[in-house]
Amino acid sequence: MNSLAFPSCPSALTPASTTAPASSPFPSPRIKIRCPRQEDAAHYHLRLRDRSSSQTVIVAMAAAAPASSVKEVLPSPLTSASEPPPLFDGTTRLYVAYHCPYAQRAWIARNYKDKIKIVAIDLADRPTWYKEKVYPENKVPSLEHNNQVKGESLDLVKYIDSNFEGPSLLPEDPSKKQFAEELLAYTDAFNKALYFCIVSKEDVSEEAVAALDKIEDALGKFNEGPFSLGQFSLVDIAYVPFIERFQIFYSNIKNYDITKGRPNLQKFIEEVDKIDAYTQTKQDPQFLLEQTKKRLGIA
């Protein structure tokens, strides 16, 4: 499904160019926000005065911080002329392409966790060592951890959440966990319906409308906030890179507003844009649109 929905991104064969309220629905107040001034000092602090003890309490702020927070300084993409990093030296590395929605999933999850270094790959000019020495599938994302390399974006999101220190990205409620698995299993079908509609010269298809309506209903299931499980979770991480792009593409290519008549989806988009762990990964909308138009042969 990956190469079908967004062929220029993960496919090895077709490279591409290079103050939440007190009742905040976010997973934890200890989400780290990465700051370019120090690689490992990855969070800001809010100083609060405890009136009963007259002491200053320092609280690590969540990824719900405004999108205007300081942006992480990211490394330049590595090309065929680049030397490989010192592989398997104990450093945990997440290999991404900045414009790839599949890699964006793992990147968002990484922003909630500790000690995962970003390594960017230029998919249009991939280094040969990436396939030969890192990931034989020659796709992104991949994760170098404990002398192994793992791939596949949904698997990596779960792996990152389970194996690194940071706030949990999945609620404990069994009913929510079951619903999460159902929605994660639906991601490929959702992307397929929306993507095929874009490449078609016909009007917006019934399949695309039904897929969007399914997400609209899912976002309202627990009635606890703007996100699919009440709190921002693995499920939202799986969908948001694609919803971000489909909103841009449908508006400009199909003249169709995916949020019209879908208040839950509208609220989701508004609120996710307040989450620093996500906004740190967003790319220029015009770049994404032009790249897609070029691939589809649309003037």
Image (cartoon, grey):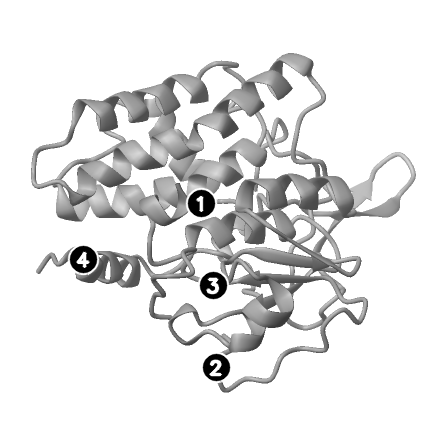
Q: Residues within 10 Å of mark 4 (few under 14, many from 20)?
A: some
The structure residue drawn at horizontal position 35% and vertical position 20%, both measured from the top left corner, is 214
Q: Is residue 222 left or right of residue 258?
A: right
Identity of the residue drawn at 38% across and 72% down: 124
Place of residue 225 in the rendered image (x, y in percent of width and height, measured from the top left): 51, 23
Q: Secondary structure at mark 2?
A: loop
Residue 207, visible in the rendered structure: yes
Under circle 4, the secondary element is helix
Q: Position of residue 102 (x, y in %)?
A: 47, 49
Residue contact between numbered discs 4 and 1, judged by CB atoms under 8 Å: no
Dot 4 corresponds to which residue? 293
Marker disc for residue 80: 2
Instruction: State whether residue 83 is above or below residue 48.
Output: below
Of residues 148 and 121, which is closer to you in this image? 148
Q: Earlier in the sequence, mark 2 or mark 1?
A: 2
Q: Nearer the viewer, mark 1 or mark 3?
A: 3
Please report whichever mark, 4 or 1, sits nearer to the chain's N-terminal start: 1
The quadrant holding residue 244 is top left
Q: Amino acid at mark 2?
A: Ser
Q: Is residue 214 above or below residue 100?
A: above
Tell me which residue sits at (55%, 47%) in the image.
Answer: 152
**Separation of residues labelled 3 and 4 (CA atoms):** 19 Å
Which residue has dot 1 on it?
Answer: 273
What residue appears at the point 76 percent right and 64 percent down from the top-left corner? 41
Dot 4 or dot 2, earlier in sequence: 2
Three-letter amino acid code of the residue under disc 1:
Asp
Q: Earlier in the sequence, mark 3 or mark 4?
A: 3
What residue would you read off at disc 3? 97
Q: How many angstroms separate mark 1 from mark 3 (CA)?
A: 21 Å
